[in-house]
Image (cartoon, coloured by chain):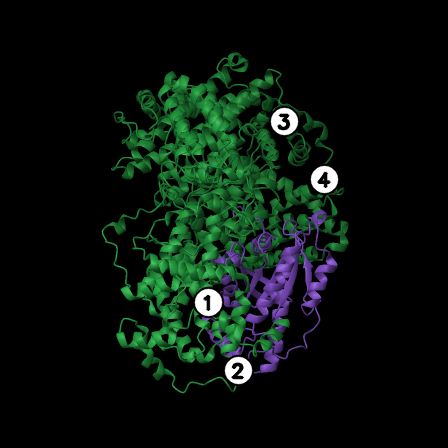
């Protein structure tokens, strides 16, 4: 069902409160090269194929930009996502604080799994003079979340943009592999649903997962690069 | 033979072009020659059929082709005459043809093939076809840039419109660009005004200017015709003639403008008004030319020099003469052929750069110095090789006497050896990096040996005494194959060597390899041998070839038979092969192919002929890639121009037209604003295709209908910003400076595009301020003047813009400041000119100010939001009467008491349809209040913003509704009841879908799909399959994957009233803002520095989203049930208060009612589906018994579980621990 037979199709949710520059980050990433006019209303607007450590993966970015106030929608995005970019602006402390709540929701939705692939992103690193969130503060937060990687990006200067997406992909892949190793069951070929199963199927699977509503014992996660 | 010498110069002078015109970067191509253009264009067919001869289908070739260097040039100018069709009558092959070029022809390039052939339209004649780029040089001129740009855009547009819509031509945007281009040209050449000094002093300039204006006015007239015809019902085919005509006229204008520039450059230069810019541009290339010149001339230069100078003096005039400046039409043919024989054209063109003399003066001193550059040598010798091999192949294909074959083979061997010598020299020079070369060289040598052996083989089997051998077809094929592969390897070898030379830097080869001299000699003889018939012959072949290719092209790509491969690869090599007039000469030597007929051993196979033709075609033309003097001989074959007669006929037709059309103008001018449909009498000429197809502009000069010119002139004198406007492929404005956009809003010739106007008004506050906009409109009012034809309609439009702004698009808060400016305009500027309009505008202003005073200025005065031209009328609903609310008296009572604080009314008691209706009414009310500026503020997602109130209400409502649903599902302790509630909501969702209320639908489905609900396994076991099916159907609709593709598609055929899910469009707006820059650069302005203008494309797209949402802002025709709405409101309010905690609350609650991992206390309901079915009647509260039962157990079940939560305490610890993770 995936087009052109991409082996993996991952959904990445870009989450953060309004005004942190999520959309710029995503737009920069998806656009890649300069195009004369960017049309976000077409099907492929948020799809991009990238290479992660030699694997071709197709990413579908789900960016909540614009719908931050639709809190019920968040879960809509979160549920189907395999990995998350939690974005705040280094010029706004509250944007970092708000992420805590969102991260909690993610963990909840993912059945309490604390090892959901997450990258903490401090955007607007070009506005160094307006910085209010210090690197160490952000790093602290990332450590408190189980050592998720922390990046500072500048969508405007195209710094670290694709890096954050690649990192979260890497986490998803790693998780997939370890799960595949663990389960070795034929019923879960794609591990974390990386393969292109339909939403409905995924939903059904999740329903099963939720029965055992507890963190899976997968603490043996590798440290972040 | 001075003439010939000159040609040599001519050839070499062009050598500067290949980097430009040759190595095109395909990515830079601006257009695809993919559509068939009726009449004058040839389209796909060509592309497909023509390419194979030159196709670089073989992978080797692409490897070899040099990295692209220059930009894609939209325009080329022919330096040499090129005539593929001198003797031929053409039938169906005409489409596939190469076109003839005359020196000075301007060519609009559609695409350039890697082999140097370009698909282009000769503007002088309007013909489209393939032409050799090496006969041309890239043309650009700082002053002409805008005009050429406009022409390109125009062409694009016409190409598009061919199969899309013709709506673009309803307005005259496309013409305006051309006019502005001409204006720009005249302005910068100081010739804008008739009494400008230059114009007064120089007859040439004066005449050219006049001609230009005449052409322009014709163009404008035809555009008007077109515009009018389009509005008529019978348009049909006439349109196509008109389109063709308008295009031809545009060609004429451009051609004329080029002629004007030539003339201007010459005369102005004489006038000591030296233009520094073009001059400076030329300088760097000059030494290069000189170097090349020196290489290949063995002949006296003096004579040539003199000739050149002479010709430079008179050529521009002559070239222009073709446009009718000098000679009469009948004399023209002679003129041209005379030139063709003298052939000093090429240099003459450089006269625009004012550097002919300069160039020539350098020729002599440097001539001897640097003839030994390795690159030059390589090119030279490679050419020689190729030409000989080409000749060799031609030889076999045309069955010449075998004695000749020996000679040819010898020549090949000599040439190849000298080539090897050069390669060796380079190889030695840069030894460390040249393994590739060595490989290529070895290959090359091997092929050469193959060839020698093959030739020997032929003779070995000969048993004839007279030395003439009978060559068997197989042998012949073999020879050709070998020869072609030799060409290929030679090409590889040469290109690799060339690359190496580039890497290690050019150097001089001091000791000339011996054989070269021989080759030179050979070349000398070859030169002599060229005869006129030769070329037509080969061209004739090529024509047959093309038709052949039609059949063969299919076969070309898969691993082809040997011959094919050989042939095609042979042609491939012409990428570098670049020369082979010598080949031509050999083909055409004493015995021409056809006269050789009797001697034919066997009739050539079609394929052979095909390949031969391909080859010879390539040699004849692309040979001209001009490494050497030989190609100039091709130039010498100059046909008498054939169109001279046609010109005079067309001329008279034109005279007629411009005369009549003039009357048209004056009529138009009387018809105030509505210039779109001037109701004047039909112009007699418009439907006549014969007349319309007349195009030669020279006529218009002779006819000298000064009125038309005056008209054109007045138009030119108007200030315009059209050059600062750019359009996309669909003809929509994609960028422009503010003045240009304002000009576009208030064009004189047609009502502005409503989409453009509304886009502008919706978004202009994002790229300018209301005061600035008002100022710009006022400025336009002033600079346009009050001429009847132009000024008056524009001024009325400006007035209308102000009016529309105040009435429809007024933004009370943002636009307040502009009120003063508008008032000033109305009273001081507008009123003196147009008293009535001024008064009306003033009235309107008074109304607006009044509403500011009494505070009723909330919205626009006349039409509401969403009542722009695009909103869907709700009349489709008109027929239907409002449905009766499905609610009972007792339900109303229960709702009333519930709101009043009495016992709660359960949602299950209410009819699902009515529930859906009332929710929809609540949502619709907010939705219809959303104003464009809210959407465009992009601030709805900011916390604590006061802007975008309705958008935020919308999202708040959505969230609250979702919470209400979640609350009601999670409230019951009994799984059975929860399943019932889910079923209930799924029915509501179903009705919402029917009502097109996607926003609420989304809210409900978000909750049902949320993890807190989804994890309720026991509950879901009790949900019927039917309900699950319904839910999954709805889920398919709202699926957010692929960027909500399914939801978007549903809204493509809009049925108002409808409430789209606003979130999608908010995301669209956010990303449109984030992903598109505010400004863009105007495309390819020749004048150098890029001009940045407003990226209107971005705003147009945003406006599109806004108007998309607006068009659904139609109220539902439903009857409100105040009780139910009040009840809903109460619940929604309650949710809003605790909005933030809801997520965690739900989570806790979910864990309480169905604790994870088989809690013993959790009652496991024995009955599953059966029980569900049993409950079915209870869901319908109308059945009395069910209602009673429900009421009893639901009475204390409210939406809220908060009270319950207080009592509960024990499983929360679990949930809390969960959260701490």
Residue B584: which disc? Answer: none
Q: Is residue B544 visible?
A: no
Rendered image quadrant of residue B1189: bottom left
Measuring 71% from the left and 43% from the top, which residue is drawn there?
Answer: B374
Chain to which the residue tagged by mark 3 belongs: B
Rendered image quadrant of residue B885: bottom left
Q: Are marks 2 and 4 on the same chain?
A: no
- Left or right of B915 on screen, residue B1012: right
Residue nearest the observer in this picture, B1008 or B217: B1008
Q: Nearer the viewer, mark 1 or mark 3?
A: 1
Q: Colour of chain B?
A: green
Residue B855, horizontal then vertical, whole percent: 44, 36
Residue B459 drawn above or below residue B808 = below
Separation of marks 4 and 1 at Cα, in angstroms: 82 Å
Q: Colour of chain A?
A: purple
Chain to which the residue tagged by mark 2 belongs: A
Q: Which residue is mark 2?
A: A186
Q: Nearer the viewer, mark 4 or mark 1?
A: 1
Q: Secondary structure at mark 3?
A: helix
First-in-chain label (4 vs 1): 4
Residue B601 drawn above or below residue B657 = below
Q: Which residue is mark 4?
A: B372
Q: Secondary structure at mark 4?
A: loop
Residue B1007: which disc? Answer: 1
Measuring 47% from the left and 63% from the top, which residue is drawn there?
Answer: B1041
């Amino acid at each position: 069902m995936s087009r052109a037979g991409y082996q993996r199709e991952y959904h990445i949710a870009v989450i953060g409160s309004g005004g942190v520059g999520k959309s710029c980050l995503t737009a920069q990433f998806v656009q890649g090269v300069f195009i004369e006019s960017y049309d976000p209303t077409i099907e492929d607007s948020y799809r991009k194929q990238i290479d992660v450590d030699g694997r071709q993966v197709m990413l579908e970015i789900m960016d909540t930009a614009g719908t931050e106030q639709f809190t019920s929608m968040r879960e809509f995005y979160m549920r189907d996502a395999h990995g998350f970019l939690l974005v705040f602006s280094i010029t706004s402390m509250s944007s970092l604080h708000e992420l805590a709540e969102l991260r909690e929701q993610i963990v909840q939705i993912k059945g309490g799994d604390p090892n959901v692939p997450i990258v903490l992103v401090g955007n607007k690193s070009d506005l160094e003079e307006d910085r209010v969130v210090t690197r160490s503060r952000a790093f602290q937060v990332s450590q408190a979340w189980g050592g998720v990687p922390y990046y500072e990006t500048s969508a405007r200067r195209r710094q670290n943009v694709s890096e954050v997406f690649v990192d979260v992909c890497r986490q998803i892949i790693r998780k997939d592999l370890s799960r595949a190793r663990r389960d070795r069951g034929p019923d879960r070929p794609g591990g974390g649903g990386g393969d292109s199963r339909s939403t409905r199927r995924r939903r059904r699977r999740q329903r099963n997962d939720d029965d055992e509503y507890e963190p899976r014992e997968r603490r043996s996660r590798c440290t972040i690069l | 033979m001075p003439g010939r010498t000159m040609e040599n110069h001519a050839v070499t002078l062009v050598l500067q072009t290949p980097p430009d015109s040759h190595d095109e970067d395909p990515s830079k191509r601006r257009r695809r020659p993919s559509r068939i253009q009726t009449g004058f264009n040839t389209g796909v067919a060509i592309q497909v059929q023509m390419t194979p001869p030159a196709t670089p289908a073989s992978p080797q070739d692409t490897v070899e082709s040099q990295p692209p260097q220059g930009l894609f040039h939209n325009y080329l100018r022919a330096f040499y005459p090129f005539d593929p069709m001198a003797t031929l009558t053409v039938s169906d092959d005409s489409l596939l043809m190469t076109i003839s070029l005359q020196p000075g022809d301007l060519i609009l390039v559609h695409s350039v093939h890697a082999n140097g052939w370009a698909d282009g339209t000769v503007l002088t004649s309007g013909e489209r076809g393939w032409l050799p780029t090496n006969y041309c040089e890239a043309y650009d001129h700082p002053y002409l840039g805008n005009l050429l740009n406009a022409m390109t855009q125009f062409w694009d547009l016409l190409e598009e419109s061919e199969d899309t819509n013709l709506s673009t031509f309803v307005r005259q945007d496309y013409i305006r660009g051309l006019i502005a281009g001409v204006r720009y040209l005249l302005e910068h050449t100081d010739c804008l005004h008739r009494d400008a000094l230059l114009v007064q002093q120089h007859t040439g300039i004066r005449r050219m200017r006049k001609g230009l204006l005449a052409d322009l006015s014709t163009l404008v007239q035809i555009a008007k015709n077109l515009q009018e015809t389009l509005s008529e019902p019978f348009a049909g085919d006439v349109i196509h003639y008109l389109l063709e005509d308008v295009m031809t006229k545009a060609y004429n204008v451009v051609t004329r403008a080029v002629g004007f520039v030539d003339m201007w450059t010459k005369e102005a230069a004489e006038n000591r008004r030296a233009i520094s810019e073009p001059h400076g541009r030329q300088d760097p290339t000059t030494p290069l030319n000189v170097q090349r010149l020196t290489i290949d001339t063995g002949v006296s230069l003096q004579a040539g020099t003199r000739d050149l100078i002479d010709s430079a003096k008179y050529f521009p005039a002559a070239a222009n003469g073709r446009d009718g400046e000098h000679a009469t039409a009948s004399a023209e043919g002679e003129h041209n052929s005379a030139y063709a024989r003298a052939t000093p054209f090429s240099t003459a063109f450089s006269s625009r750069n004012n550097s002919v003399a300069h160039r020539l003066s350098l020729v002599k001193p440097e001539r001897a110095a640097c003839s030994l550059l390795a690159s030059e040598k390589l090119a030279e010798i490679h050419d020689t090789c190729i030409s000989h091999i080409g000749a060799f192949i031609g030889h076999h294909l045309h069955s010449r006497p075998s004695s000749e074959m020996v000679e040819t083979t010898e020549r090949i061997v000599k040439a190849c050896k000298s080539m090897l010598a050069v390669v060796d020299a380079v190889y030695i020079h840069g030894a460390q990096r040249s393994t590739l070369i060595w490989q290529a060289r070895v290959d090359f040598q091997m092929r050469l040996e193959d060839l020698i052996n093959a030739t020997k083989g032929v003779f070995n089997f000969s048993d004839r005494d007279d030395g003439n051998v009978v060559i068997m077809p197989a042998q012949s094929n073999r020879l050709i194959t070998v020869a072609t592969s030799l060409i290929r390897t030679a090409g590889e070898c040469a290109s690799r060597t060339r690359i190496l030379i580039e890497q290690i830097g050019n150097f001089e080869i001091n000791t000339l390899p011996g054989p070269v001299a021989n080759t030179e000699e050979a070349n000398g003889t070859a030169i002599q041998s060229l005869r006129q018939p030769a070329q037509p012959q080969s061209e004739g072949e090529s024509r047959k070839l093309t038709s052949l290719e039609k059949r063969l092209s299919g076969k070309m790509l898969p691993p082809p038979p040997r011959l094919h491969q050989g042939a095609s690869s042979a042609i491939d090599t012409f990428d570098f092969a670049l020369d082979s007039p010598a080949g031509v000469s050999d083909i055409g030597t004493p015995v021409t192919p056809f006269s050789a007929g009797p001697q034919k051993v066997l009739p050539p196979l079609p394929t052979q002929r095909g390949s031969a033709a391909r080859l010879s075609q390539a040699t004849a033309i692309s040979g001209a890639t001009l490494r050497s003097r030989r190609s100039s001989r091709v130039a010498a074959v100059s046909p008498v121009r054939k169109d001279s007669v046609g010109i005079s006929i067309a001329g008279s037709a034109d005279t007629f037209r411009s005369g009549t059309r003039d009357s048209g103008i004056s009529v138009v001018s009387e018809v105030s604003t509505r210039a779109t449909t001037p109701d004047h009498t039909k112009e007699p000429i418009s439907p006549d295709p014969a007349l319309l197809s007349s195009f030669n502009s020279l006529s218009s000069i002779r006819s000298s209908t000064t009125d038309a010119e005056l008209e054109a002139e007045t138009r030119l004198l108007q200030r315009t910003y059209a050059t600062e406007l750019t359009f996309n492929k669909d003809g929509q404005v994609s960028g422009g400076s503010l003045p240009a956009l304002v000009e576009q809003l208030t064009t004189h010739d047609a009502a502005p595009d409503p989409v453009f106007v509304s886009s502008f008004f919706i978004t202009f506050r994002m790229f300018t301020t209301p005061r600035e906009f008002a100022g710009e409109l006022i400025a336009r009012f002033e600079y346009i003047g009050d001429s009847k034809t132009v000024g008056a309609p524009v001024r009325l439009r400006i007035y209308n813009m102000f009016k529309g702004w105040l009435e429809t698009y007024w933004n009370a808060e943002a636009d307040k400041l502009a009120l003063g400016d508008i008032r000033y305009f109305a009273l001081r500027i507008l009123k003196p000119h147009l008293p009535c309009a001024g008064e009306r505008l003033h009235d309107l202003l008074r109304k607006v100010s009044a509403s500011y005073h009494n505070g009723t200025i909330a919205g626009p005065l006349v039409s509401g939001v969403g009542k722009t031209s695009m909103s869907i009328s709700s009349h489709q609903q008109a027929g239907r009467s409002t449905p009766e609310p499905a609610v009972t008296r007792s339900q109303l009572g229960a709702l009333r008491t519930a709101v009043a604080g009495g016992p709660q009314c359960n949602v299950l008691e209410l009819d699902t349809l009515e529930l859906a209706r009332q929710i929809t009414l609540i949502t619709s009310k907010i939705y219809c209040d959303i104003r464009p500026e809210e959407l465009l503020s992009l601030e709805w997602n900011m916390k604590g913003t006061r802007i975008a109130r309705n958008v935020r209400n919308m999202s708040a409502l959505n969230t609250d509704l979702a919470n209400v649903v979640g609350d009601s599902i999670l409230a019951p302790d009994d799984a059975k009841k929860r399943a019932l509630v889910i079923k209930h909501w799924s029915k509501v969702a179903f009705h919402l879908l029917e009502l097109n209320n996607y926003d609420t639908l989304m809210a409900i489905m978000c909750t049902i799909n949320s993890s807190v609900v989804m994890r309720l396994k026991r509950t879901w076991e009790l949900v019927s399959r039917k309900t699950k099916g319904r839910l999954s159907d709805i889920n398919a609709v709202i699926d957010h994957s692929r960027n909500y593709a399914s939801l978007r598609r549903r809204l493509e055929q809009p049925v108002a009233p409808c409430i789209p899910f606003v979130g999608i469009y908010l995301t669209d707006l956010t990303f449109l803002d984030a992903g598109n820059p505010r400004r863009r650069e105007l495309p390819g302005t020749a004048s150098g520095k890029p001009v940045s203008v407003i990226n209107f494309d971005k705003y147009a797209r945003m406006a599109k989203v806004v108007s998309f949402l607006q068009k659904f802002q139609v109220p539902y025709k439903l009857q409100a049930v105040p009780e139910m709405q009040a009840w809903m409101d109460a619940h929604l309010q309650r949710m809003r208060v605790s909005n933030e905690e809801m997520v965690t609350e739900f989570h806790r609650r979910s864990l309480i009612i169905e604790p994870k991992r088989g809690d013993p206390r959790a009652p496991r309901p024995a009955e599953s589906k059966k029980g569900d079915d049993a409950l079915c009647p209870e869901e319908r509260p109308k059945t009395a018994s069910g209602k009673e039962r429900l009421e009893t157990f639901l009475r204390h079940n409210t939406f809220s579980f908060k009270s319950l939560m207080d009592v509960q305490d024990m499983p929360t610890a679990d949930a809390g621990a969960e959260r701490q993770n």
